[in-house]
Image (cartoon, rainbow, N blue to C red):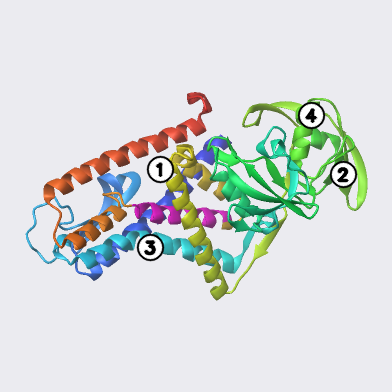
Amino acid sequence: MPQLLSLLHTIFVMGIVLGLMILIHEFGHYAAAKYFGVRVEVFSIGFGKRLLGFKKGETDYRISAIPLGGYVKMSGENPMDDRTGDPGEFLSHPRWQRFIVALAGPAMNIMLAVALLTGVYMVHYEYPAVLDEPAVVGWVNPNTPAEKAGIQIGDKIVRVEDIENPNWEQVDVKDALSPNQPLKFGIERDGKVTERVLVPEPLGPNQYGDIGWVPKESSVTLKTVEHGMPAEKAGLKVGDQILTANGEDIPALEALVQMLNRTKDQPLELVVLRNGQKQTFTVRPILDPGGSRQGPAYRIGIARSVPTKVVTLNFSDALQRSLSDNKKSSFLILELLQKMVQHKVSMRQVDGPIGIGSAVGAAAREEGYTPLLLITAAISLNLGIMNLLPIPILDGGVILLLFIESLMQKEISLPIKERIYQAAFVFLVLFAVMVIYNDLVKTLPGLTRMP
């Protein structure tokens, strides 16, 4: 029953978030069209059969049966429709006006992303402190590119490709978007900088690149002690700081995970700091069938508390930071698309409806509204950028054809437009099928074998 309620809650929240995205996007087209005097026949949330709605003036405002998008139907916008020359028809208007109508939808999504981040930065933005700290290595996982390259605890990453003195956020993004691709790093140790070339390995369902290093943590402090698990039975509590395990320092939680892989169900002697006093506990790990993405793993039932920073800015600074962050995110989206076209990254890095729903549900379950607002802003930005791609049927395709017609100083012939739209429709259908299939593969690992 709890799982069913969680699923229904996720579907409900996802419906609200995606509904807002569609409403904002289509309202952009609608408002621009009405401003220029284009007759809008239908404003629909969803596709297919009309379920409910109302008609006001010349426009039918409706909710349709298939909740996978939405549309604004403007009079005479389809090139295959017969043109009457009516001034209310879309194609009767100058190209620059049609350009603005096509651009208005994605622009509204991008503006929504900027507005949401601005609001978050003005009220309460909490994020892991390590993301904007110098990239100092706190742990190196075994049998990873980092270990094979000789990276050691305490090494500082002073350069990644053309980025000097990167923070961990910049390093992580470069790693994630570069699976199986060599990256040039500058590594500082004992005051000397050496050049290293490391190749991130694809990891997990999304096949993001991973080098195998972990940021240096100020401490391993427990945020969660699971009920009924060995840690709780041994007496560990939330807020305890783990210092050593079996006499070895624990600079990061990953160090304890690796130790569990070695010692398996053998007892662990943990030294923790509680209220300024050192205490010793003996914990016997258990084998959890779903302990990791790779399968069974030994666990003691703890999760660390991640040190965070909180940002509260005035409107001007919040807007400036929002614009900067959305600009960086936009370039990352374009970089990902470019690498997909070049077959440098896997299609599995793209989430479809299931992946998006999972992310929205996870954000909705977190404390406060900030995580949900952040994921909503990210989805809105992605929707705006994706709709600007120069693919006919999408807004970017309409803009491209208008640009070509402006250069030609005449309309593209109807037969050519028909072929272009037919090919684009087939492409989008195949792309949608591929994305949904990848979603299923990532959600149901037994469906196919991961490479």
Residue type of the residue flagged with mark 2: Val
Alpha-carbon distance for marks 2 and 3? 52 Å
**Image location (x, y in percent) of residue 109:** 40, 59
Q: Residues within 10 Å of mark 4 (few under 14, many from 20)?
A: many
Residue at (64% x, 57% y) in the render? 166
**Residue sitting farthest toward the left:** 84
Q: Are marks 1 and 4 in contact (CB under 8 Å)?
A: no
What numbered label is drawn on residue 285? 4
Rendered image quadrant of residue 39: bottom left
Q: Describe the element under mark 4 as helix, strand or loop.
A: loop
Rendered image quadrant of residue 307: bottom right
What numbered label is drawn on residue 272? 2
Confirm whether the magenta stretch covers residue 382: yes
Residue 340 left/right relative to 397: right
Q: Describe the element under mark 2 as helix, strand or loop.
A: strand
Q: Which callout, 1 or 3, points at the residue further toward the start of the chain? A: 3
Residue 38 left/right relative to 309: left
Residue type of the residue flagged with mark 1: Val
Q: Describe the element under mark 3 as helix, strand or loop.
A: helix
Q: Are marks 4 and 2 in contact (CB under 8 Å)?
A: no
Q: For the magenta stretch, what is the residue range?
A: 371-389
Residue type of the residue flagged with mark 3: Met
**Image location (x, y in percent) of residue 182:** 57, 42
Residue type of the residue flagged with mark 4: Pro
Q: Residues within 10 Å of mark 1 (few under 14, many from 20)?
A: few
Mark 1 or 4: the one toward you: 1
Confirm whether the magenta stretch covers residue 89: no
What numbered label is drawn on residue 404? none
Alpha-carbon distance for marks 4 and 3? 52 Å
**Image location (x, y in percent) of residue 36:** 22, 69
Q: Which residue is mark 3?
A: 108
